[in-house]
Amino acid sequence: MSASIATSQTILVVGGGIAGMTAALEAAECGRQVILAEKQPMLGGRTALLYRYFPKMCHPVCGLEINLRRLRGNPNVRVMTMTEVTAVSGRRGDYTVTLKTRPRYVNENCTACGDCGNAVSTTIPNPANYGLDKIKAAYLPHGMAYPQRYVIDPSIVGTAEGEQAKAACKAGAIDLGMQEETVTLKAGSIVWATGWRPYDAAKIQPYGYGRIANVVTSVEFERMADPHGPTGGKLLRPSDGQEAKNIAFIQCAGSRDENHLRHCSRICCMASLKQTQYVREACGEDGRSTIYYIDIRAIDRFEDFYQSVQNDPTVRFIKSKVARIALDEQSGNPILHGVDTEGAHRYANAHDLVVLAVGMVPEVTGVALPEDILLDSSNFIEGSQSGGMFGAGSAASPLDVNRSVQSATAASLRAIQVIHQTASTEAV
């Protein structure tokens, strides 16, 4: 199905994470019409997958709930989930954009009762937990999912289980005949808030990710610490399900390395400092965290948090870039090998679990960026040659949540300026 919607006075925001939501809301609350397109079934992006923010250690619900309430109450924003940009043409103030929307197989009648999920037995890897556990093939993407609507995985469409899910739905919300839709719209300005993805830790071969079971990434560890995560908040070793009490955090896993990512990802140091507190909470005084670091980049207001972690007797800092990780076959422990540059001595330290603080990669793979877009050397979006498109949040630079919001607000204001100038030109 093809349709034409919106006008040159519309702002298109691509990406519905914290930056995309912010950009859309700021423009909408200034009276502008906004289309917010998100490729996942829900808004919130990676912020929704955090257990806690740093440095206050509060839960993401703090910021997301407010933004979702603002979205629900603003008629100027049209939210399109499971939607990707496939083409952009035109010029500043007059873009033509093609969007492709995948079928959810669940319509607006859904009450999120869960009957469809109870009716099926097929499971799929859980994207909200980075595939660390499985969920039913009829699922609610997240407890705070917006829209609050189930998704039917394509794997059971056309099967008996799909029909069972449909029969179980008392609201008549399941439509297994939904098809992919294509929409063409006009937009005067575009904000790209496509976010980031974790660097593929398997590419850092000396660290053994994917080969040594008890080596995980920082984003996986974040979900493990969450009571709603795959282990119910318990820090369990993937190899044997035993509690991990002696945990190593390796900084700059893939970042600041010409063989991987040249840039500093900026969030990794603070993320690891935060995660040492998860260890303390889970294990108490028996927990031990060791941070292997090149240098700790905790700037501005984060310095106080860094100092508080330094004063934690359960946390140890070793200034070293770990050379390699070996496996102790008998215990399953990863053995870290390297040189402590402050003591100038070699070490071979065993830990229950190793957490790799993986770098941020801009999420532009598979995104149909127009030729007009300007990227920096790490593929972060700088803007466009004509000045009609803007990067926001971690699509524009490695940023934490707070700075992503600031970046998105700035991008939204620039987009509003483009719309205003376009309107002024058309009036003349």
Image (cartoon, grey):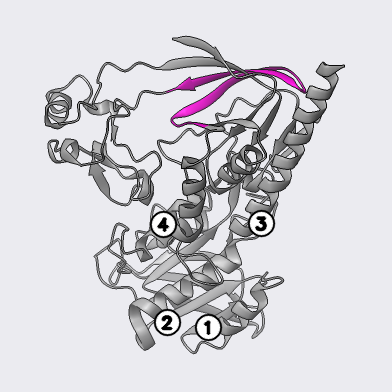
Q: Kindly identify the residue that appears in the image at 32 percent across and 52 percent down.
A: 132
Toward which corner of the image does residue 232 lie, by quadrant?
bottom left
Give the amino acid type for the residue marked by disc 3 in the picture: Arg
Q: Which of marks 2 and 3 is nearer the N terminus?
A: 2
User: Which SS class for mark 4?
Assistant: helix
Horizontal placement of 378 versus 203: left or right? right
Give the amino acid type for the residue marked by disc 2 in the picture: Arg
Labelled pair 2, 1 in contact (Cβ < 8 Å): yes
> How far across and down, in percent of the image, does residue 317 sit?
57, 80
- Bounds of the magenta segment: 78-101
Give the amino acid type for the residue marked by disc 1 in the picture: Arg
Q: Kindly identify the residue that appears in the image at 51 percent across and 27 percent down.
A: 84
Per the rendering, the mark at residue 292 is none
Labelled pair 2, 3 in contact (Cβ < 8 Å): no
**Could you tell me if residue 208 is visible in this image?**
no
Residue 79 counted in the magenta span: yes
From the image, tell me which residue sits under label 2: 288
> How far across and down, in percent of the image, does residue 427 sit?
83, 18
From the image, tell me which residue sits under label 3: 403
**Could you tell me if residue 164 is visible in this image?**
yes
User: Which SS class for mark 2?
Assistant: strand
User: Which SS class for mark 1?
Assistant: strand
The answer to which of 397 and 118 lies nearer the viewer is 118
Q: Residues within 10 Å of mark 4 (few under 14, many from 20)?
A: some
Per the rendering, the mark at residue 220 is 4
In this rendering, the label closer to the viewer, 4 or 1? 4
Distance CA(mark 4)–CA(mark 1): 22 Å
